[in-house]
Every structure is written in structure tokens, then in C-alpha cells.
Amino acid sequence: MSGVSGLRAALVVGLLAATEVRAAFAQPAPAATPTPLPAAPAPYQPSFVQIVPGGACEEARIYEVADVGAAAQHARRRCRLELMETRLAAERQQAVMNAERAQDERVETWMEATQPTRVLRPVSADVLAGTGLVSYGLMVSWDVLRRMEIAAWIGRHPITCAAAYNPSGGDCTRTAYGGHARWFFTEKDFTPFIGTGFAFSSSSLAIYAPSDPSSFGGNVLAGDGRAHSVDGSAGLLLSVRGLRLSLEYIFEYVYYTGANQNDMQKTPSEDLRIVWSDSLRQDRHGIRFQVGYAF
């Protein structure tokens, strides 16, 4: 019995050994692990701390002069290209400015050769002097069209009250202001013209009013007068660059006169009005000379 038990134990051990050998041969062989190849060295790039936000030339300055690496050479080439582009852009801008300046000069030369001075310099400030409604004054004119000018003016005519029959003298200077328009017959710098306008006048008044025609007694009647008038004129104008010269004859038509005394009620006075109207009628013809500068 002991012999059979030993044989049975030997068979079990043999079967276990055979099973282990079969399992070992049945397992697949492990795959071979590839050997990693060494990575190619990446081109050197400066860090974010080293990059200066100023362009390629700023980047090229971070490399040493003796650095001949690919990154340094690339940065230097970019810097040279950037400098060339900057220079070409400046040259193009200068060429455009020169062309615009030359165009402006050609246009200005053409206008000076073909256009009248009144077109190039339409606004003028003038001083006027002469006879008529006013003896001197100031005027501002504007050439709204090639042959048409409008103006506004103010002037005075010195008169002493003695000239208005007041033995005591006094200041009765006439002040007037108004508007004026001229039409030029040609577009040349020397041209005849006709004009028309309106004016408002005022003045202090004083006359000697005898109280009794049979005696030498009397008193001074003082007040002020006002008048409205229209005028017509004809003359010649000369324009020399900024200088304006004109000479014209003016006829003044007074269509309204009024006068009142210097009392609390401002009483209308026919005597003062007659003297005031006579004074204006005497100065309805006048010669006016103007000189000014246009810009």
C-alpha cells in the first residue's frame, strides 16, 4: 500500500511540472522597447524677459557682437531689413510732401497769373477821406463775387455849430454809418465801377433864434438831428497785390430828416430840421478817396 501511494504522489508532481512548462511556452514573448533617438537641438530663442518690445534692432542688441549663432544672425538680418523699410518709408513720405508742395506752388503761380487780386484777396480794410456826407472814416469790404463787392463803413464830418448860425460855437460834428455795394466792369486789377448804398446820419444841432425880429435879442436853440439817405457812385479801382486804391464820385439823396430840441419832451423843432436839412443838402455831392489793405 505504501508503494502505490508513493507512485501516485510522483505522478501528481510530474503533471504539475508539465503544466507549468506548457504555460511558460504558451505566453507571448514581451515586445521589444524601442530605444529613443536623441532629439534635434531646437534653435535658440530668447526668453520673454530678454525680448524688448522695440523691434528687430532691439532684439539684435541682446546678442554679443562676437555671437555668430543662427539666432543672432537672424536677428541682425531682421534689423537691417527694418532699418531699410524705415528709410524707404521716410523717403516715400518726403517725396509725397515735395510733390504736394510743388503742386501748391504751381496752383498759386497759375492763380496769380490768371486771377484778379480781388479773387486772391477778397477782404479789405480801408481808410476813406474826401468831401460829402463824411470827411473821413473806416470801411471793411468783401468781394463776394468776382465783380461784386459789399462793404460796411462809418465816418464823420467835423462841423462847428457856428457854421450852423450859432455865434456861441460848439461841436455839431456829423456822424454817419451805412453799407455800400460796387459792381466792377472788368475782372482786371484796374477797372471802373459803379456803386450804390445807404446811410444813417446824426448830429448835434444849435442855432441862434432871435426872440424879436425887430431887436438883437435872442437865444440858442439846441437839439439833435437824424437823417436817412441813399447814394449812387462811380469811380476807378486799382489793386496792386494787397494794396487797394479807389477814387469815386458820390451823390447822396436824403429822403428823410428829423430834429428835436434838447428838452425833457424831446420836442420836434422845424427850425432845427430846416438847418439840418440844408446842411445835408450842401454835402450831397462828394468825392471819396479810399486806400486799404486786402488779405
Image (cartoon, rainbow, N blue to C red):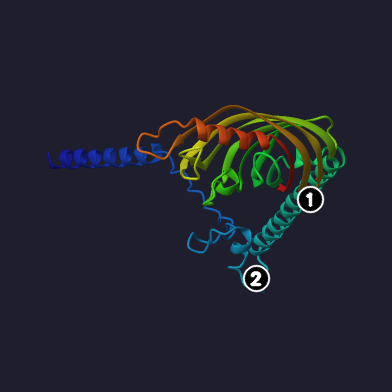
Query: 36 or 207, which is in the foreground?
Result: 207
> For this view, does 248 lie left or right of residue 225?
right
Question: 111 and 201: which one is in front?
Answer: 201
Element at label 1 = helix
- What residue sits right under mark 2 in the picture? 67
Q: Amino acid at mark 1?
A: Asn
Q: Residue furthest right?
A: 113
The answer, for residue 200, to whether it is visible in the render is no
> Closest to the observer: 220 or 66?
220
Query: Which mark is nearer the camera, 2 or 1?
Result: 1
**Quadrant in which the N terminus appears:** top left
Q: Position of residue 130 (x, y in %)?
A: 72, 45
Q: Which residue is mark 1?
A: 98
Residue at image x 36%, y 34%? 265
Farthest bottom residue in view:
66
Left or right of residue 120, residue 223 in this image:
left
